[in-house]
Image (cartoon, helix red, strand yellow):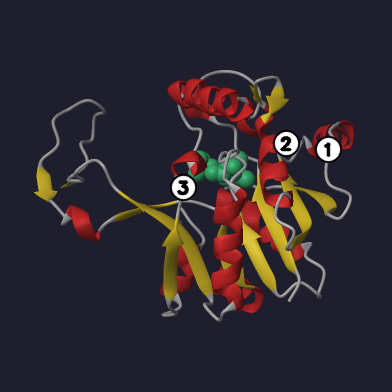
Amino acid sequence: IPVAAVIPAAGRGVRLGPGAPKALRTLNGTPMLIHAVRALAASRHVALVIVVAPPDGAAEVKSLLDAHALPDRTDFLVVPGGDSRQESVRLGLDALPPEYGVVLVHDAARPLVPVDTVDGVIEAVREGAPAVVPALPLADTVKEVEPAAVHGDPEPVVATPERARLRAVQTPQGFDRATLVRAHETVTEDVTDDASMVERLGLRVVTVPGHEEAFKVTRPLDLVLAEAVLARRRL
Ligand code: C5P
């Protein structure tokens, strides 16, 4: 079953501070999006990568892809994104040719995911799981709170879920194509990942091992960490 990847890259990245859209910020001189595209195209199973660009930035993203060396055996498409991550993913799915039966959705903001993680997700979908997420145990204890109306005010703790049962999930998340399309047609509530839409359909979502280097570049410190990881890889 041919595998395609959709990379939502239309976010502004406000938490990273002022500047270009997050996916176009550079890590060691190369845009984060290019790192992410290469990370997915590094899997020999991924035949097509669809990049969902900022709505006004599709042309810029196309020329970026043309300007960087990418594997010949992979096809690339660029489509304009939407106002939410969810809408951007849906617009990417709309552009998916019929032959692709497995779809990965991968954040441009996770530029350093290792190929073994990508392949682990693909393998689990090919073995029959309708939805697969890479996951890691948590270092921090997590509290549920009653969010304060004013940022910075003390927040009452409501519960402490047992840490050993919690996982932080990453991308790429992998799906049987028909399942993901149905999830996007059916679920209208706001979600923060694609697998949760499949959960809402009542279908089984499973985890495979994630990787520390698949962390999401969100805040300024993450840029420092990402460049350090790249420097270590060059050794
Ligand atoms: O905001 P968050 O960190 O959850 O964004 C995750 C990914 O979704 C990023 O790669 C971002 O570019 C993408 N995104 C998008 N369209 C939006 C918002 C976010 O493609 N409207």
Q: Is residue 155 left or right of residue 79?
A: left
Q: Is residue 108 visible?
A: yes
Residue receiving disc 1: 65
> The disc labelled 3 sits on which kind of residue?
His
Q: Are marks 1 and 3 in contact (CB under 8 Å)?
A: no
Q: Are marks 1 and 2 in contact (CB under 8 Å)?
A: yes
Total marks shown come to 3
Q: CA distance from mark 3 to mark 2?
A: 19 Å
Q: CA distance from mark 1 to mark 3?
A: 26 Å
The residue located at (43%, 78%) in the rendering is 204
Secondary structure type for disc 3: loop
Residue 15 image position (x, y, % from top left) = 47, 28
Residue receiving disc 2: 34
Res. 95 image quadrant: bottom right
Q: Label 2 crowding class (10 Å Cα cut-off): few <14, some 14-19, many 20+?
A: many
Frontmost of labels 1 and 3 is 3
Return the disc, 1 or 2, that comes first in the chain's sequence: 2
The residue located at (41%, 56%) in the rendering is 135
Q: CA distance from mark 1 to mark 2?
A: 7 Å
Q: Is residue 185 visible?
A: no
Residue receiving disc 3: 211
Frontmost of labels 3 and 2 is 3
The residue located at (71%, 39%) in the rendering is 54
> The disc labelled 1 sits on which kind of residue?
Leu
Q: Quadrant of ligand 1?
A: top right
Q: Is residue 19 left or right of residue 50?
A: left
Residue 53 image position (x, y, % from top left) = 73, 42
Secondary structure type for disc 1: helix
